[in-house]
Image: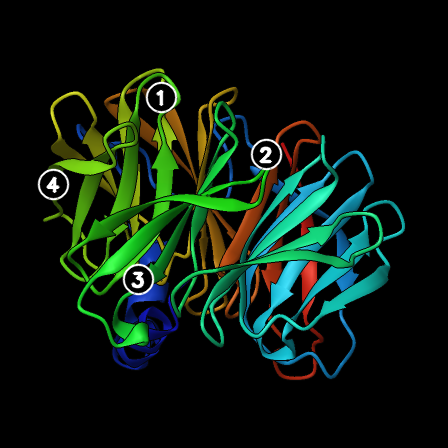
């Protein structure tokens, strides 16, 4: 996610973190009509996540992470320790570090196409680019030139297009682009210009042509038509601030927007209206919705770090399943529903090496 967003969060945390995080763990998290106190257990008495493994980095890896990606066919985990200018690769079975892909100035988001055995990495450094690697040899295949601060991306499995945020404030521009890259040919095939210097996470609705984009600069959601490549609606966010994470319940027309001030704001995608805000820890950077279990997982780095879990009872009511401690600065998570696992990257802190923690979904 955006580096400028991280600076905002760090400044805010210095003032609020020591108060807000302990307070939230003691407060009740409620649905729109009220609910039980939030704790770290489900209604059946078990924790929603159980730690079952750790992928440890060497002691010299002292940086934040921006993405974790699980590739099931070859049993690998990819992640982006940014200051190392590389992507690191772990074996999913042995939990050992097996490779480092170097030469990526500021690695952000990743996609792996199993049918092509290709890894796609957004690179925010230098002039900005999408780097495409051979998934077997790790050799660079192609570099697609974009604007500086190439960052968040989202994949459309129907068209094989990758939508990529680039440009904006860190590129000294008053606008940002959402570039469209054909991942089969490796060519840029389109551009969507949005008049904001700060964009972040996106979500695709595969049942229609809508693309939801978090406009962090103006604290709203931009709704883009992927066919016309134009904005068709803008939804202001009033129940939270500094929106930078997003997830979609497509079947029930609910958009979940993670705000670093400590909320998941719920929108009705048919009306564009805010419905409610679910309290979470501060600093969220990753949000995922699992349609099978109807659970939301929020990776929040403030304080000791936590994974905040909610269950969707129905589209208008949400039950907090509590917080699972992750680690200070742990902002990057990935749910692998086929394995019933949740992975979160934790930066080095005190005498503890950086690691990816593996949790079993209970």
Q: How crowded is mark 2: few (under 14 residues within 10 Å), some or many (20 or more)?
A: few
Task: Please state which of the two labelled residues, at mark 4 or mark 3, is closer to the viewer.
Answer: 4
* Residue holding disc 2: 46
- Disc on the earlier residue, 2 or 3: 3
* Residue holding disc 3: 23
Q: Is residue 15 visible?
A: yes
Task: Please state which of the two labelled residues, at mark 3 or mark 1, is closer to the viewer.
Answer: 1
Image coords of residue 2 (percent x, y) = 37, 66
User: Hey, which residue is sitting farthest right in the picture?
Assistant: 94
Q: Residues within 10 Å of mark 1 (few under 14, many from 20)?
A: some
Q: Is residue 28 visible?
A: no
**Residue drawn at the location 45% of the way across and 64% of the way down:** 301
Image coords of residue 319 (percent x, y) = 36, 31
- Disc on the earlier residue, 3 or 1: 3
On the rendered image, what quadrant is the C terminus found in?
top right
Q: How crowded is mark 3: few (under 14 residues within 10 Å), some or many (20 or more)?
A: few
* Residue holding disc 4: 234
* Residue holding disc 1: 250
């Amino acid at each position: 996610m955006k580096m400028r967003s991280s600076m905002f969060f760090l400044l805010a945390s210095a003032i609020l973190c020591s108060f807000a995080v302990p307070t939230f763990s003691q407060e009740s998290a409620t649905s729109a009509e009220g609910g039980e106190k939030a704790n770290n257990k489900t209604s059946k008495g078990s924790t929603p996540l159980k730690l079952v493994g750790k992928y440890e980095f060497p002691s010299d890896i002292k940086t934040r992470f921006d993405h974790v990606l699980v590739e099931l066919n070859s049993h690998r985990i990819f992640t982006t320790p940014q200051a190392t200018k590389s992507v690191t690769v772990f074996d999913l079975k042995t939990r050992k570090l097996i490779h480092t892909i170097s030469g990526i100035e500021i690695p952000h988001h990743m996609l792996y196409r199993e049918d092509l055995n290709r890894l796609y990495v957004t690179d925010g450094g230098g002039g900005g680019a999408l780097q495409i690697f051979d998934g077997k040899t790790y050799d660079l295949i192609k570099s697609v030139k974009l604007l500086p601060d190439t960052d968040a991306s989202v994949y459309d499995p129907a068209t094989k297009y990758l939508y990529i945020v680039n440009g904006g404030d860190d590129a000294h521009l008053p606008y940002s682009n959402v570039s469209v890259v054909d991942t089969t040919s490796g060519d840029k095939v389109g551009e969507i210009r949005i008049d904001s210097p700060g964009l972040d996470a996106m979500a695709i609705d595969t049942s229609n042509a809508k693309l939801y984009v978090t406009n962090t600069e103006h604290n709203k959601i931009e709704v883009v038509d992927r066919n016309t490549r134009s904005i068709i609606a803008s939804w202001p966010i009033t129940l939270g601030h500094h929106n930078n994470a997003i997830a979609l319940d497509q079947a029930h027309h609910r958009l979940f927007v993670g705000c670093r001030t400590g909320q998941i704001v719920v929108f009705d995608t048919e009306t564009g209206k805010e419905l409610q805000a679910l309290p979470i820890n501060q600093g969220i950077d990753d949000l995922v919705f699992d349609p099978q279990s109807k659970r939301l997982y929020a990776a929040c780095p403030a304080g000791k770090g936590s994974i905040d879990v909610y269950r969707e009872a129905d589209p208008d009511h949400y039950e907090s399943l509590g917080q699972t401690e992750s680690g200070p600065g742990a902002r990057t998570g990935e749910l692998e529903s086929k394995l019933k696992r949740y992975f979160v990257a934790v930066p080095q802190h005190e005498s503890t090496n950086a690691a990816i923690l593996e949790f079993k979904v209970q």
